[in-house]
C-alpha cells in the first residue's frame, strides 16, 4: 500500500505543483474582478458535475464491482460501463449547452444584476462544459487502472489540464479576453487527459473501446450502488453550489478569493486525501474479498496515521502565516497584495476543516468497500443542513462574506466525519489500533508546536528582510515554511513519535 501511496502521491504532488503554476499564471493575467469571477463560475460548473457523476461516486461503485470480477467478465463489464458513461454524458452535454443561460442564472443568481458578467459566464461555461465528457472517460479508465494497481496515469492526468490552461493563458492576446483563454485551455486539457489514459490503459492490455450499452445484471448492481454514492457526492456539491450562489451576491472579487484560497487548501487535500482514498478503497476491497478483516483494519489505521502526519503541518502553516502564503504564491501582476490579503482570511477558514476533509477519505472507503454507499449519504445530508444554516448565519447575520462561506464548509466536513465515525465504530469496522491512539496525539502536538514557532519568528523575519527588494514575498514564505517544517520534525522526535 505504501508503494502505491508514493506513486499516487508523487504524481498528485506534481499535479498540484503544475496546478500552482497554472494558478500563478491565471492570477497574474486574470487578476481579481469581473473576468475572474465569471471564469470561476464557468470552471466550477463542470467540476461540480464531475464530482457528482464521475470520480468519487463512479469509483465507489465501479472499483469494488470490477475488482470482484475476473478475466473476460471484468473486461466485458468495463466496456459496457464505458458505453453507458459516454452515452449519458453526451446527452447531458447537449442539454446543458441548450439550457446554459438558465443553468448559469441558477448557479450564480447574483450575476443577473450584472448582465455583462452574466453573458460572459454563459459563453465561458459553454466552452468548459465539454470537459465533463472528457473527464467521465478519464474517470472510467482511471478506475479500471487503479483496480489493477496501476495508479500513476489517473494521478498524472490533471497535469495535462494544468499545462494546457497555463499554455492557453500565456497566449491570451489571441482570444477575446483572458477568461476565454482559460476556458479553451480547460477544454484542451480534457482532451489531453483522455489521450493519456487511453495510452496507459492500452499499454497494460486493458480495454478502451466501448460497446453499445446493455442493461446487464452487473450494470443493475452498479446502478444500485452508484445512486446513493452520487447522492452523497451531490450533497457535498450542493454545499459548494450554495457557496457559488451566495458568493455571486457578494462584492466583486469574492468568488475569486474563494477560488485561490481553496486552491491552496486543495494541495494537501489532493496530494494526501486523494492519494489515500484512491489507494485505500481497492486495498480494503481486496482484503474484504479475501475475508481478511484484520488486514482491512490495518490498512485503515495506517492510512489515517499518514493522513494526520502529512495534513496537520499544512494546517499549522495556514493558521500561522496565511497572509505570507497568499502573497508569496499569487501577489503579482493583476492580483495585488490587497487581493492576496482578502484570500488569506478565507484560507484560514478553509484550513479549519482540512483534517476532516482528508480523514473523510479514509473513513468513507470503510463503507464503500463493503458495498454500502447509502450510509455516507445520510451523513452528508445531515451535515449539509447545519452547513447551510451556519453559512447563512455567518453571511447574513454577521456579514462574514467569503470567510463565512468557507467556515461553514469546514464545520460541515467535521460533522460529516463525526457521523460516519460513530456509525462505523458502532458497526465494528472502525477500530483504532494502539499505534494510532498513541501516535496521533503526538502528531497533533508536533503540529501545534510548529505553528507556534512559525508565528513567533514571523515578525522578526519580516523585519530582517525589510531591505530585500527582489522576490521578497517569495523568500519570506520559503523561510517561514522551512522553519515550520524543521520545527515539526524536531517536535515529532521530541514527542517520541515513531514511524
Image: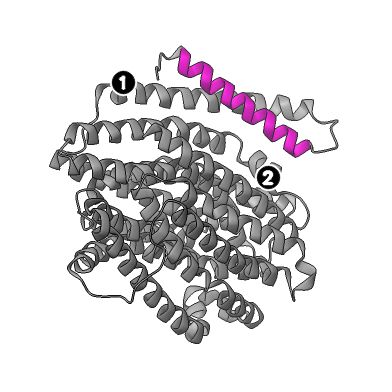
Quadrant location of the C terminus?
Answer: top left
Quarter of the image for residue 286 reads: top left
| Residue 44 percent across, percent down from the top left | 52, 65
Asked if residue 401 lies in the magenta stretch, the reply is no
**Foreground residue among 57 and 286:** 286
142 in relation to 457, above or below = below
| Residue 292 percent across, percent down from the top left | 17, 35
User: Is residue 250 in view from this perspective?
Assistant: no
| Residue 182 percent across, percent down from the top left | 66, 66
Q: Residue at x 23, y 36 (%)?
A: 296
Instruction: Tell me the magenta residue range.
Output: 472-493
227 in relation to 386, above or below = below
Q: Residue at x 47, y 33 (%)?
A: 310
**Foreground residue among 2 and 248:** 2
| Residue 272 percent across, percent down from the top left | 45, 40
Count up the numbered dots.
2
Tell me how far mark 1 sits from mark 2, CA to CA: 36 Å
**Foreground residue among 411 and 144:** 144
Quick one: SS at disc 1? helix
Quarter of the image for residue 382 reads: bottom left
Furthest residue to the bottom? 98
Q: Is residue 61 left or right of residue 443?
A: left
**Foreground residue among 324 and 360:** 360
Mark sitting on residue 329: 2
Colour approach in the figure: one colour
Give the mark, 1 or 2, whose residue is nearer the N terminus: 2
130 in relation to 319, above or below = below
Q: Main secondary structure of the magenta part?
A: helix
Q: Which residue is disc 1 drawn over?
A: 438
Q: Residues within 10 Å of mark 2 (few under 14, many from 20)?
A: some
Q: Residues within 10 Å of mark 1 (few under 14, many from 20)?
A: few
Amino acid at each position: 500500500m505504501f508503494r502505491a501511496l508514493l506513486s499516487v502521491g508523487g504524481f498528485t504532488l506534481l499535479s498540484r505543483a503544475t496546478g500552482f503554476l497554472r494558478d500563478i499564471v491565471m492570477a497574474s493575467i486574470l487578476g481579481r474582478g469581473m473576468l475572474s469571477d465569471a471564469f470561476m463560475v464557468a470552471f466550477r460548473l463542470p467540476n461540480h458535475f464531475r464530482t457528482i457523476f464521475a470520480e468519487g461516486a463512479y469509483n465507489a461503485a465501479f472499483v469494488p464491482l470490477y475488482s470482484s470480477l475476473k478475466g473476460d467478465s471484468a473486461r466485458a463489464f468495463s466496456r459496457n460501463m464505458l458505453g453507458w458513461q459516454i452515452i449519458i454524458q453526451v446527452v447531458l452535454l447537449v442539454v446543458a449547452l441548450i439550457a446554459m443561460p438558465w443553468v448559469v442564472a441558477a448557479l450564480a443568481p447574483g450575476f443577473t444584476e450584472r448582465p455583462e458578467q452574466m453573458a460572459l459566464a454563459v459563453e465561458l461555461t459553454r466552452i468548459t462544459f465539454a470537459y465533463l465528457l472528457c473527464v467521465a472517460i478519464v474517470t472510467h479508465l482511471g478506475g479500471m487502472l487503479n483496480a489493477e494497481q496501476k495508479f500513476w496515469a489517473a494521478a498524472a492526468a490533471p497535469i495535462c489540464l494544468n499545462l494546457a490552461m497555463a499554455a492557453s493563458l500565456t497566449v491570451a492576446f489571441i482570444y477575446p479576453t483572458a477568461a476565454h483563454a482559460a476556458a479553451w485551455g480547460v477544454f484542451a486539457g480534457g482532451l489531453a487527459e483522455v489521450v493519456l489514459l487511453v495510452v496507459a490503459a492500452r499499454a497494460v492490455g486493458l480495454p478502451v473501446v466501448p460497446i453499445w450499452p446493455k442493461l446487464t445484471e452487473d450494470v443493475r448492481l452498479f446502478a444500485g450502488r452508484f445512486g446513493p454514492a452520487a447522492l452523497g457526492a451531490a450533497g457535498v456539491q450542493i454545499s459548494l453550489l450554495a457557496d457559488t450562489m451566495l458568493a455571486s451576491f457578494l462584492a466583486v472579487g469574492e468568488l475569486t478569493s474563494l477560488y485561490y484560497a481553496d486552491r491552496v487548501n486543495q494541495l494537501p487535500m489532493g496530494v494526501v486525501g486523494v492519494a489515500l482514498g484512491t489507494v485505500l478503497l481497492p486495498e480494503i476491497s481486496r482484503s474484504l474479498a479475501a475475508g481478511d478483516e484484520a488486514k482491512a483494519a490495518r490498512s485503515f489505521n495506517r492510512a489515517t496515521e499518514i493522513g494526520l502526519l502529512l495534513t496537520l503541518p499544512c494546517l499549522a502553516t495556514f493558521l500561522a502565516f496565511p497572509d505570507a502564503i497568499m502573497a508569496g504564491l499569487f501577489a503579482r501582476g493583476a492580483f495585488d497584495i490587497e487581493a492576496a490579503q482578502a484570500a488569506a482570511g478565507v484560507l484560514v477558514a478553509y484550513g479549519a476543516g482540512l483534517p476532516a476533509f482528508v480523514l473523510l477519505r479514509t473513513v468513507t472507503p470503510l463503507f464503500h468497500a463493503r458495498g454500502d454507499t447509502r450510509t455516507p449519504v445520510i451523513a452528508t445530508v445531515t451535515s449539509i443542513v447545519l452547513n447551510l444554516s451556519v453559512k447563512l448565519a455567518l453571511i447574513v447575520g454577521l456579514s462574514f462574506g467569503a470567510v463565512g462561506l468557507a467556515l461553514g464548509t469546514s464545520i460541515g466536513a467535521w460533522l460529516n466525519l463525526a457521523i460516519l465515525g460513530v456509525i462505523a465504530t458502532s458497526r465494528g469496522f472502525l477500530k483504532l489500533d494502539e499505534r494510532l491512539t498513541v501516535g496521533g496525539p503526538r502528531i497533533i502536538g508536533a503540529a501545534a508546536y510548529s505553528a507556534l514557532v512559525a508565528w513567533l519568528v514571523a515578525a522578526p523575519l519580516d523585519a530582517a528582510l525589510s531591505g530585500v527588494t527582489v522576490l521578497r514575498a517569495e523568500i519570506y514564505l520559503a523561510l517561514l515554511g522551512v522553519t515550520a517544517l524543521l520545527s515539526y520534525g524536531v517536535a515529532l522526535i521530541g514527542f517520541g513519535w515513531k514511524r
